Amino acid sequence: MRTSVIVIGAGHTGLAVSYFLRQQGINHVVFERGHVGHSWRTERWDSLRMLTPNWQNRLPGAPYSGTDPDGYMTMTDVAEFLGDYAEQIDAPVRTGVTVTSVRRNGADFQVDTTIGAWTAPAVVIATGACNIPKIPALAKDVPAGITQLTPKDYRNPEQLDDGGVLVVGAAATGAQIAAEVRASGRAVTLAVGEHVRMPRTYRGHDILWWMERSGIWSQRFDQLDDIVRARHLPSPQLVGSTDKVTLDLNYLTDLGVQLAGRLAGISNGVAQFSGSLTNVIALADLKARRLLHTFDEFASSEGLDANLPASETLADTHVPAKPPLARSLTDGAITSIIWATGYTADYSFLDIDVLDHKGQLKHDGGIVTDAPGLYRIGLPVLRRRNSTFVNGAEADAHEITDHLARYLGSNRVSSAAADNELPAYDAVLARSAS
Amino acid sequence: MTTAETAVNNGVDTAYLLGARAALSDAPAAAEFVWRAHGEWSDGTHFKASVKDYFGLGEEQTHLTEHKFETDHPGTFGSKDRAVTPVEYVLVGLGGCLTAGIASVAQNRGIQLKSVKATIEGGMNVLGILGGDPDVRNGFTDVTVNYEIDADASQADIEALVAQSQKRSAVFDIIANPTNITVNTAKVTVDTDSAAEVA
């Protein structure tokens, strides 16, 4: 089967690409291994809600229209929201189709799938940024008998036995899981490396309102001083909750979570923590204050101060007097480790030489220059700071499909056959079956 | 603040460093360095060392000149105090590393340094190395660095400089984090000794 563009993945980015391809009249198909929004449905913990408030979850052609603009969607809500969107834009999604290989085939790409081989002059990889949980190499030294989970396996504290839990990583995921596990009564040690501190609200608005309104969120990848750093920033310590709590280290300390430095080694059954906790906290406080100062400057330069509450002062993060440098993993106090140490993208299906020495895709703002016609969307700071957020999909998808349309030129496949043989959209069916 | 528009000069070639970062990111093998010191016991607790060669950028390199170092222990340890203690060398290394980082980051951020003074302290319970208390570790119980910095920047920007320098410091990492150490030993017969015995 041949079509103009094969989009891999029917999450928010793949659907946004589909929207613009349809606008341009470009024939395409969207392959989805599960149902629309598969990862959101099946690979997240129970309590997770979106970090962005509902009003911000815009997709192209679909502003928020619900009744709770300031709330935060649950994962079920997200899957439903994406399913509705796919239906609304009539995206040609083929659900339950796994892509097993993408390779060159003459001027086309050949995409092998569980329903056979397809070809197209262009392919957009929209498989998300969070495919494989990253587990540090030192995990090999964890003593037998300790239960190890990643955020992909973790669902809720009831999964764990009653022993203490070491949560490694203090980005949004680690902070959320540490809080929830501690609230279940278990002793929690949180290993904290570099992290991004953000109050949930500032001067009466959600912090992400400020990120958006001030323009920081739409800063382009080619205008940032240090794109490597920007692309590797941990996700901010945020949680979507009804009471809009600020999930910072002070909040966790107040809950009774023991803070430790970054997990630096495991030796003879002892977890060793870095002595750098004081510095990573100092860095996070400095950067958080700098960010809030930037918001204040934005507010006054835009003349918004009269309509906003006064500037707020961010309290210092309380550093424990003697953060632990070591914890036994054999004395029974800690029985579980949760690796909240980030995710990496999976390119195991890609049989084209476009990966760097760390196995990540080489691209210029989503354009894979070493393989013309190949595109990527939905990676951290792909084209803007908000590239992985729902509201970042529109601008990125727009630009990428524009580039793609120019690349295709007149080389579009008008394969009515492809559309006729397939149900145009079967996600609705799949969704009702789930 | 941009370096292009300001005449900040801390004597650090940040363009070279940023170029090296870009070049080494594309050629990861060249980024593998090996640092070396050679040394020999003198007598008592006195050790004499030298540093000249190292490996980097894919080949053997040498410093412009050979540098010599000595360590010993003070009279409070019953030694002759011919040189600093090894742990004081570690403090010097930490101060040197952090301060080089401050100068580099300041240059990159367009901050002119006027004076940077460091006091580096390491607390230690010597019962550890003396074997007097099995619950006491040998090394530092804590390390404190106090900086006094005069620069054309706000207090917050200066704090950010120092924080960033810690984040990028090799010696800070070496002290703060565990490292696997392998010590190999070979029994050898030194010719001069046997010659002396024969004579």
Image (spheres, coloured by chain):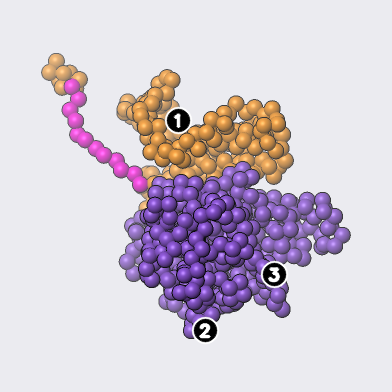
Chain colours: A purple, B orange
How much space separates mark 1 and mark 3, taking CA atoms? 69 Å
Q: How many marks?
A: 3
Tell which residue pokes out farthest to the top in this image: B199
> Where in the figure is residue A88, as x and y percent of width and height?
62, 75
Q: Camera-side residue: B153 or A236?
A: A236
Residue wearing tag 1: B84
In front: label 2 or label 1: 2
Residue sitting at the far right: A306
* Magenta span dominant secondary structure: loop
Q: Which residues are magenta?
A: B180-191
Q: Which residue is mark 2?
A: A432
Q: Amino acid at mark 1?
A: Val
Contact between marks 2 and 1 (CB within 8 A): the answer is no
Q: Nearer the viewer, mark 1 or mark 3?
A: 3
Query: Which residue sits at x=77%, y=65%?
Result: A204
Is A285 placed above or below B11 here? Answer: below
**Subunit of label 1:** B
Name the image quarter holding residue B183: top left
**For numbered disc 2, what is the local secondary structure?**
helix
In this image, B148 relative to B79: left or right?
A: right
Label 2 with label 3: CB-CB less than 8 Å: no
Q: Position of residue A82 (x, y in %)?
A: 58, 73
Q: Which residue occupies the foreground of this view, B29 or B62?
A: B29
- Comes first in the chain, label 2 or label 3: 3
Is residue B177 visible in this depiction of the protein? no
Separation of residues labelled 2 and 3 (CA atoms): 24 Å
Compare residues A403 and A171 and report the one nearer the observer: A403
Q: Quadrant of residue A16?
A: bottom right
* Residue at the disc numbered 3: A63
Q: Secondary structure at mark 1?
A: loop
Label 3's element? loop
